[in-house]
Image (tube, rainbow, N blue to C red):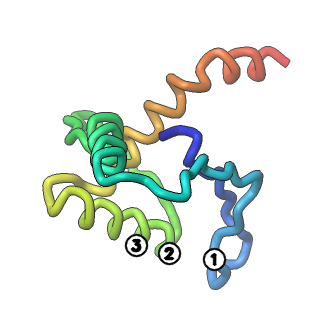
Amino acid sequence: MVSELTIQSEVSTPSEQTELINPVKPSTQKRTGEKTKKEALERCRQTFLQVPKIDDRKTMFVNCHTRDRIDEIVRKLEGGKMSVSGLIKNLALHHMEFYGEDIERWRKL
């Protein structure tokens, strides 16, 4: 879910890991039932893990640590059906849709 995402900023030295800026604490329950966990995973799959068609490609760079973490998520949740590029595309589109009005207001400042 969007409330569970954190905003990360790249650090200037490549050897350092990314640092969290304004982390959003997820709303967690002490005891989450299996049905709730499965529903959350299904919402995540429907939102972020649908394999997109990427026709007009451009290169985008992320550091190795970030790419490896994204790759691990993709492998664990989708078992080879999804690519890192596909997940990044889905995340970016969701973010732009969710914050679209804010982005437009900020652009005009």
SS for callout 3: helix
Q: Residues within 10 Å of mark 1 (few under 14, many from 20)?
A: some
Please state if 107 lies on the left or on the right of 17 as rendered: right
Mark carried by residue 93: none
SS for callout 1: loop
Is residue 36 shown above or below 32?
above
Of callouts 1 and 3, the N-terminal one: 1
User: 53 and 41: which one is in front?
Assistant: 41
- Whether residue 57 is visible here, answered yes or no, is no
Q: Pinpoint residue 96: horizontal percent, then vertical percent.
A: 53, 28
Of callouts 2 and 1, the N-terminal one: 1
Mark carried by residue 17: 1
Name the residue at 58% across, 40% down.
Answer: 3
Classify the position of the C terminus by image quarter: top right
Q: Which residue is mark 2?
A: 65
Task: Measure the alpha-carbon separation of dots 2 and 3.
Answer: 5 Å
Are dots 2 and 3 in contact, CB under 8 Å?
A: yes
Q: Pinpoint residue 85: horizontal percent, then vertical percent.
A: 32, 51
Name the residue at 63% across, 84% down.
Answer: 15
Are dots 1 and 3 in contact, CB under 8 Å?
A: no
Task: Measure the alpha-carbon separation of dots 2 and 1.
Answer: 7 Å
> Identity of the amino acid at label 1?
Gln
> Identity of the amino acid at label 3?
Asp
Is residue 17 shown above or below 99?
below
Q: Pinpoint residue 12: horizontal percent, then vertical percent.
A: 73, 71
User: 86 and 59: which one is in front?
Assistant: 86
Q: Residue furthest bottom?
A: 15
Please state if 103 lies on the left or on the right of 81 as rendered: right
- Whether residue 67 is visible here, answered yes or no, is yes
Q: Which residue is mark 3?
A: 68
